Amino acid sequence: MRIALFVTCLADTMFPEAAKATVRLLERLGHEVVFPPGQTCCGQMHINTGYQRAALPLVERHVKTFQPYDVVVAPSGSCVGSVRYQHAMVASAAGDERLATRASAVAERTYELSELLIDVLKVEDVGAYFPHRVTYHPTCHSLRVLRVGDKPLRLLRNVRGIDLVELPAAEQCCGFGGTFAIKNADTSAAMLADKMGHVLSTGAGYCSAGDASCLMHIGGGLSKAKTGVRTIHLAEILAATE
C-alpha cells in the first residue's frame, strides 16, 4: 500500500524520531511511505483558539496536498482529529462547500497510526521488540475525539519483551491542552503533577503515548523532577526491533 505521511508540526520540528519511526515501521511491514513536501500546519491551533478564518488557507493547502493519496497517516491523534472533524466545518463556515466536500473526502482516508495498523492494515503484531517496563497514557484527542479505544494497547501487548503496566487513572488529562497550559498554567501544572504521580507509581521506565504534545508536557515534568523516567512515542516502540 502507498501511504502518505502527514508529519505534523511538533513531530517535524521537535520530535522527528516519532515520524521516522512511523516510516520505518510501515516500510518494515511492506508498504511504501511518501512524504508530500507541500504540507504545513493543519491549522488545529488556529481553530482551537477561535481563528477559523486564519485557518482556512491552511485547510485549503492541506486538502490540496493530500487529496491525491488514498491513505494518509499521522503519528498524532490530535492532528488527525482536527483533519477529521474540523476541516470541513471551517470550510463550511467560510461558505466554501466545495472545499468542505473535498476536506471530508481527505478526512475519511486520514488515520492515526494505531487506527491505520489495526483497522486498515489488519495487523496487531508488528514484529516489535522492546524489553522495558512501559506504561501508556491515552491522550485526550485519541481517546475522546477519535475514540481509538484499546487499539494502542493491543499493539503494545504484542511487542516482544515488553513489560506493559496499567496506568492508574489513565483517562485523566495530563493538563497540556495546547494553549490551555499557558493560559491556565496553575491548573495545568496541578493536572501534570497528578499524571506524573500515577506514572511513577507504575515503576515504569518509559511512559508512552500517541501524541508528541502530551509527551512533551509529561516528559518535561518528569525530566524537571529528575525522575529518570523517559517518554517515548508509540511509533518508536512499535518500530523497535532486536
Image: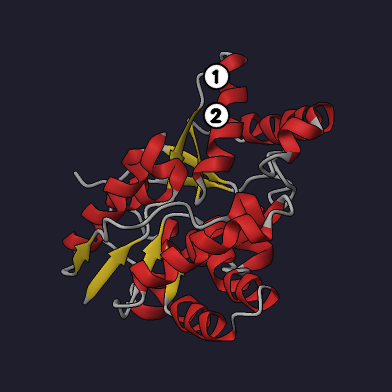
Q: Position of residue 198 (x, y in %)?
A: 69, 36
Quadrant (top left/top right/bottom left/bottom right) for the C terminus: top left
Mark 1 residue element? helix
Q: Is residue 223 left or right of residue 14?
A: right
Q: Which mark is residue 109?
A: none
For disc 2, the marked residue is 219
Q: Is residue 229 left or right of residue 138?
A: left
Check whether the beta carbons of the residues at disc 2 and disc 1 lie within 8 A of each other.
yes
Closer to us: 234 or 69 = 69
Residue at 51% from the left image edge and 61% from the top image edge: 57
Q: Is residue 119 above or below residue 55?
A: below
Closer to us: 161 or 73 = 73
User: Which of the 4 image quadrants contains residue 195?
Assistant: top right
Closer to us: 211 or 88 = 88
Q: Position of residue 160 (x, y in %)?
A: 31, 52
Closer to us: 79 or 115 = 79
Q: Is residue 84 above or below residue 132?
A: below
Q: Which mark is residue 223?
A: 1
Mark 2 residue element? helix
- Residue at mark 2 to residue at mark 1: CA–CA distance: 6 Å
Residue at 82% from the left image edge and 33% from the top image edge: 184
Q: Mark 1: which amino acid?
A: Ser
Q: Is residue 64 left or right of residue 154?
A: left
Q: Position of residue 23 (x, y in %)?
A: 25, 55
User: Which of the 4 image quadrants contains residue 187?
Assistant: top right
Q: Mark 2: which amino acid?
A: Gly
Q: Position of residue 173 (x, y in %)?
A: 72, 46
